[in-house]
Amino acid sequence: MPVTAAQRVQSRHPDRRSSPARRPSGPGSRPAGGRRAAPAGLLAPEPATTRRRRRRVVDVAAALAGIGLGAVIGMSITAESLGALRAPGGWATYGGRLSGLLGAYLMLVMVFLMARIPALERAVGQDRLARWHRRIGGWPIVLIAAHGVLVTLGYAQSTRTGVLSEFATLLGSYADVLAAVVAFGLLLLAGASSWRAARRRLRYETWWAIHLYLYLALGLAFFHQVRTGASFVGHPLATAMWEAVWAAAAAAVLVFRLGLPLWRSLRHQLRVVSVQPESDTAVSIVLCGRHLESLDVAGGQFFQWRFLTRGMWWQAHPYSLSAMPNPPYLRITAGLGGDLGSSLLALRPGTRVAIEGPYGAFTASRRSGRRLLLVAAGLGVTPIRSMLEQLPADSEPAVIVRASGRDDLVHHEELESLAAARNGVVHEVLGPRGSVRFDQRLLRRLVPDVAEREVYVCGPDGFADLLEASVRRLGVPGELIHRERFAF
């Protein structure tokens, strides 16, 4: 007999008459009286001044990007003469030069978006920055392709030769052109790997390795432009400005993607303590380190983790904390899919770990003061669990956890304990994919006052999209819906 939705939904309400809920034990937990980096119950809602400060950071960044765009267009115009435009192929050549500059500039913008600049990351969050990065991503490919086609066409018209013949001449006569073609090939490879259909089939490790070649592509493109670009040859001021912008992008990557993570890794000296299977598809890793009380992290944030052992040291993986640090311990919970699956289970105690972060704006400090609805699917429960730990005792959160079956639930006992200590309730919605639809009817039944709550949701895009659409229709404003995507 088919399983009904009512049979799949199990709710765990706190018993108001019982003693305070048991805290989970172990090095990854928060034992009573233990030291803690960010004590539960002390994370206040974000004040209005902080929200205004975040908006100012975004406004300044957008203004700088707009000024830079105007400067690029201005450089291309001032480098051309009316006579050159009127000559055979003049307009095609100018269009190619302009599109090349714009494509390179957008690539720089993408680098700044993903450079982990602390002020921008705190203001926007890594999830939204990554979305902006992906939305821009197709434009450099189109513009740089137009650059190659239009410049070749313009030169062919000016020399009255065929387009293919002119392209062969450019490749054979100018080393920088050959380097630029290689750079464009690398850009195409990275773009193809970022298409949604491709990302679903690629392992994170493969996608990450492909994107490292973008730095090589950027270097090749830079030298091609400053050596042969009409906007720079004979224009020392424009060249100096362009070099300064590229140097700033390189410095941001070196400082925030390399230097700061290296300093934090050396300071905290993290090592693996134990590896604890949570289910057939998930494992928890408990680590210990130094000075964790100074680790500025909030529940819901994530780090990039690099396990310094053979075959794993070169890969950085994003995992959320599944419990707030309890010095000298902290804990992450990871899926066993991807290239790291069996390797995570084989980690030995004492393995050194390098970190990059914390990142993300998916934290309870962003809340407006309303009661919360926390929704998680699969391993989306990990940031929800650590976030729940920092809510005040009187917060009355409603938690919904989605899983295929009871064996796939992760940290469910801890969730129940933490929710009960805060006068909350946990709903476990179990069943195969597609069998339970998170529509308005189900949400209203589980959380009758959903329209009066602020919503945090973490899970696959399809699940999060449906959940967001449902709570919007139930009256939750868009600014009170916070999402964390488990997708690269």
Image (cartoon, grey):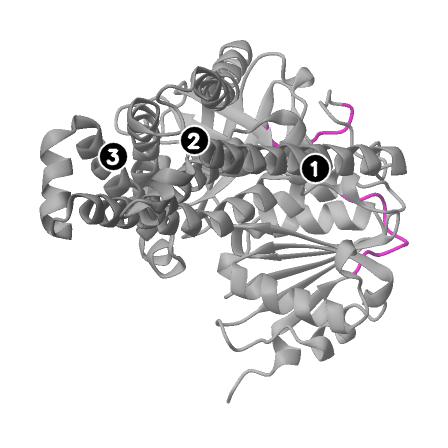
- Callout 1, which amino acid? Val
Q: Secondary structure at mark 1?
A: helix
User: How far across and down, in percent of the image, does residue 4 sit?
Assistant: 60, 83
Task: Judge whether residue 126 can be spotted in this image.
Answer: yes
Marks 1/3: CA–CA distance: 33 Å
| Numbered circle sitting on residue 195 | none
Q: Is residue 401 left or right of residue 404?
A: right
Earlier sequence position, callout 3 versus callout 2: 2
- Callout 2, which amino acid? Ala
For residue 56, above or below residue 354: below
Single out the mark in the foreground, 2 or 1. Answer: 2
Q: Is residue 390 left or right of residue 256?
A: right
Q: Residues within 10 Å of mark 1 (few under 14, many from 20)?
A: some
Marks 3/2: CA–CA distance: 21 Å
Return the residue at label 2: 79
Earlier sequence position, callout 2 versus callout 1: 1
Single out the mark in the foreground, 1 or 3. Answer: 3
Main SS, magenta residues: loop
> Which region is colored magenta?
13-33
Q: Residues within 10 Å of mark 3 (few under 14, many from 20)?
A: many
| Numbered circle sitting on residue 58 | 1
> Image point 51% across, 29% down: which residue?
115
> Image point 50% across, 23% down: which residue?
245
Q: Is residue 243 left or right of residue 158?
A: right
Q: Nearer the viewer, residue 83 or 422?
A: 83
User: How far across and down, in percent of the image, does residue 242 sit?
Assistant: 46, 23
> Image point 34% across, 45% down: which residue?
96
Return the residue at label 3: 180
User: How far across and down, in percent of the image, does residue 342 sit?
Assistant: 31, 41
